[in-house]
C-alpha cells in the first residue's frame, strides 16, 4: 500500500508540477507528498524530480516512469469507481427523452423496470423536436438514424423497417399499388420533420422516386397513423407501430418487397467518466429487453 501511495503522490506531483498542487488534489500536506516521493526515489535508487525553491520538473528517468505510472494510476481509479458503481443502489429521477412515437417502444417494458428498481423515478419526454440532451438536463435519449456528437455515448437498440399501409376502407376504393410508381396515383399521408420542415422520404428500390400526391401532412407520426386508419390515404411509418393493426386486419401493408432497409434506434447519454447507477441499469435493461422485437 505504501508503494501505491508513493506512485499516486509521484503522478499527482508530475501532473501539477508541484508538491503543493498534488497535496491539494490528494487532501494531504505538501510535506507528506514530498516524503512519499522521496521514499519512492530511495526504493528505486533513482532521482525522479529536479527540485528548486520554486518548482519541480521531471528528470529523464522520471519522465519515463511517469508515462507508465500515469496509466497504472488511471486504471486503479477506474477499478475503484467500477466497484462503487456496481455496489450503488440506482435511485433518483431519471430524465428520458424519445421521439413522440417512442412511447410505443418504452411503455410496455416500464412496469418491469419499475419493479426491479423502485427507487428510480422516471421522467419521460416524448417529442419529435431535436432535444439538446446536455443543455436541457436529460440523462438518456432514444434516437434514430446516425449519431455524430462526440459529447455523447451510444448503444444500439436494434434496427427497424418501414411499412406502407392503408385501411381496408381505402383499398375498397383504390387498387393496391404493385410497384412504387403506382404511388403517384394514391393519396399520400406525409410526415414532416419538425426541426427542418422537410418531408420524410419514402425509401423504395425504384430507380426514379415516384411523385407522391399529398393528401395530408403532419409533424406527428401518431396523427399520420390515425389518418391511415380512417381511410384518408397511404402512410409510410415504422413497421413496429402498425404491426398489431396489420395483424388484426385494420391496416393492409403493401409494396413490402420494394422497400429499402429501414433505420435503427440507439440509446444515447452524455459522455463522462462516471455513469450514474440509474443510467447504467436503464441502458442495460433496454438492451436486455430488445425493445424493438
Image (cartoon, rainbow, N blue to C red):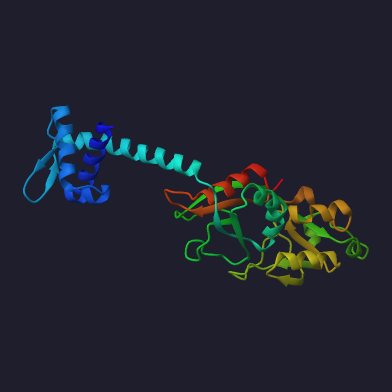
Q: Nearer the viewer, residue 227 or 177?
A: 227
Q: Is residue 126 left or right of residue 234?
A: left
Residue 96, how many percent across, how many down?
A: 58, 59
Q: Is residue 4 left or right of residue 219?
A: left
Q: Residue furthest right?
A: 172
Residue 84, how many percent across, how many down?
A: 45, 43
On the question of residue 42 being in view, the answer is yes
Q: Is residue 173 left or right of residue 26?
A: right
Reply above or below: 128 against 244. below
Q: Nearer the viewer, residue 282 or 251?
A: 282
- Tell me how many marks there are: 0
Q: Residue at x 73, y 51 (%)?
A: 259
Residue 78, how many percent across, how many down?
A: 39, 40
Residue 172, how many percent across, how many down?
A: 93, 63
Q: Residue at x 47, y 65 (%)?
A: 135
Q: Residue furthest left?
A: 53
Report which quarter residue 61 is drawn in. top left
Reply above or below: 98 against 37. below
Q: Residue at x 77, y 62 (%)?
A: 235
Q: Nearer the viewer, residue 244 or 108?
A: 108
Quadrant in which the N terminus is drawn: top left
Q: Nearer the viewer, residue 70 or 1?
A: 1
On the question of residue 178 being in view, the answer is no
Quadrant in which the C terminus is drawn: top right
Amino acid at each position: 500500500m505504501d508503494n501505491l501511495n508513493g506512485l499516486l503522490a509521484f503522478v499527482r506531483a508530475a501532473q501539477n508540477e508541484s508538491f503543493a498542487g498534488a497535496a491539494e488534489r490528494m487532501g494531504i500536506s505538501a510535506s507528506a507528498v514530498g516524503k512519499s516521493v522521496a521514499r519512492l526515489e530511495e526504493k528505486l535508487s533513482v532521482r525522479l524530480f529536479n527540485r528548486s525553491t520554486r518548482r519541480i520538473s521531471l528528470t529523464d528517468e522520471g519522465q519515463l516512469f511517469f508515462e507508465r505510472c500515469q496509466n497504472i494510476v488511471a486504471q486503479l481509479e477506474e477499478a475503484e469507481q467500477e466497484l462503487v458503481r456496481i455496489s450503488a443502489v440506482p435511485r433518483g429521477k431519471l430524465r428520458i427523452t424519445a421521439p413522440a412515437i417512442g412511447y410505443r417502444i418504452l411503455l410496455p417494458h416500464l412496469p418491469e423496470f419499475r419493479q426491479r428498481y423502485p427507487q428510480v423515478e422516471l421522467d419521460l419526454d416524448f417529442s419529435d423536436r431535436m432535444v439538446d440532451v446536455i443543455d436541457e438536463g436529460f440523462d438518456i435519449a432514444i434516437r434514430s438514424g446516425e449519431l455524430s456528437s462526440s459529447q455523447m455515448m451510444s448503444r444500439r437498440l436494434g434496427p427497424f423497417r418501414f411499412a406502407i399501409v392503408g385501411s381496408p376502407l381505402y383499398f375498397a376504393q383504390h387498387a393496391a399499388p404493385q410497384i412504387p410508381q403506382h404511388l403517384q396515383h394514391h393519396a399520400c399521408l406525409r410526415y414532416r420533420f419538425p426541426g427542418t420542415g422537410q418531408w420524410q422520404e419514402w425509401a423504395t428500390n425504384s430507380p426514379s422516386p415516384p411523385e407522391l400526391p399529398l393528401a395530408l401532412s403532419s409533424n406527428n407520426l401518431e396523427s399520420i397513423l390515425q389518418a391511415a386508419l380512417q381511410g384518408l390515404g397511404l402512410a409510410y411509418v415504422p413497421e413496429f407501430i402498425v404491426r398489431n393493426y396489420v395483424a388484426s386486419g385494420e391496416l393492409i401493408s403493401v409494396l413490402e418487397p420494394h422497400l429499402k432497409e429501414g433505420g435503427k434506434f440507439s440509446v444515447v447519454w452524455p459522455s463522462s467518466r462516471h455513469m450514474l447507477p440509474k443510467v447504467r441499469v436503464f441502458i442495460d435493461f433496454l438492451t436486455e429487453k430488445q425493445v424493438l422485437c
